[in-house]
Image: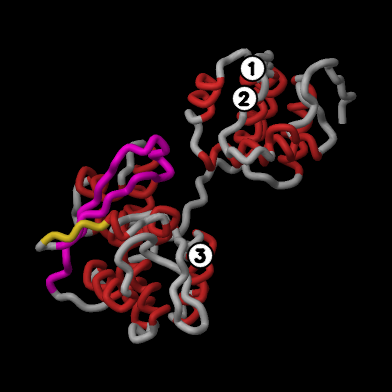
Amino acid sequence: MSPKKKAVGLPTDVSSWSDMEDSHALTGDMELSRAARRLLSDSMAKNTILAFRSDIRGFLKAGYSLPATAQQVANYLAELHIKGRKPATISRHASSLGTWHVYMQLPSPTLSLEVKGVLKGIHRKSDGRHRQAPALRLHHLQQLLNALDLESPRDLRNASMFCLCFYGAFRSSEVVALYREDIEWRDGGIVITLRHSKTNQSGRIEQKTLPRNPAGGRCCPVSLLETWLERSGIQRGALYRSIDQGGGLGAGRMHPVTFSNLLKQALIRAGLAEEGFTTHSFRAGFITEAHLRGKSDQQIKRISGHRDQKTFERYIRMADDMHDPGNDIF
């Protein structure tokens, strides 16, 4: 580890502001008005703020100090690589350190040739492949739902979540964040209002329309949601909640980690545990299924909400490889 240099009069830790009650207090003692600091902090999403704090704490716990030199940051990033951290995670740490220096009106060490070179080397050493969750196809969804007892409140809730996640190409964090007030009932289905998502941190209103399956049954997201709301009696607030041993509903919304654990348990019951499915497999599965059934990119994006074409094309290439890997020439 390179020698540390502490600058007199400048902050060397974040304890004075990283644990403040306000989750958006990042700007410290900048020469800005309170209103300006608030707006500057609010330009970052809450989850970004939490990741920022975690990254800064990690840097300090590793024995380094702030403000940092380019050599210190480069060494720290190399240590993260040795520990097996993913390139994207290491890049985020570098970005957080750069952001701290910018907020404190100091030169950013992440702009140096040393740091840029280390990051480039890290990315070149990685295999360059994007490890995506395997696609959970429609027949997998049917197998998963068939393993659930829809007379059980927990299984009914889970079936509704899983089905909604698939047909709406939702991320698990988006589904558990839904409220009863976000659902608008129409004759042919429902309109779901999505207020925040991974790619929409500004609060821009997005809506998804899900039609009712004419055949009904276990794989109709509208029918399952309808039954869940009727059985649970939920009139307002969180759409999907915890259920205690006595069958009582929790008040708050479910955590994404809980959703992941429920899926793992359901996959075991359905005999799908070895497939490697995750909560993101629903989203990947919908895109794959829709593409292989001839839906246009525009139709799929209308549901998936993809704005970045490169990210979207990764799903499409995987779907094409699965359907026609090219070995049929034999």
Image quarter of the N terminus: top right
Q: Give the quadrant of residue 314.
A: top left
Nearest the eye: 277 or 100: 100
Q: Residue 35, position in %: x, y?
A: 51, 21
Q: Amino acid at mark 3?
A: Ser
Labels 2 and 1 touching (C-beta < 8 A): yes
Q: Residue 162, position in %: x, y?
A: 37, 67
Q: Nearer the viewer, mark 3 or mark 1?
A: 1
Q: Nearer the viewer, mark 2 or mark 3?
A: 2
* Tag 3 secondary structure: helix
Q: Of label 3 and label 1, which has the lower sequence position?
A: 1
Q: Is residue 123 above or below residue 328?
A: above
Which residue is the site of mark 1? 30
Which residue is the site of mark 2? 27
Q: How many marks?
A: 3
Residue 327 visible to the viewer: no
Q: Amino acid at mark 2?
A: Thr
Nearest the eye: 219 or 291: 219
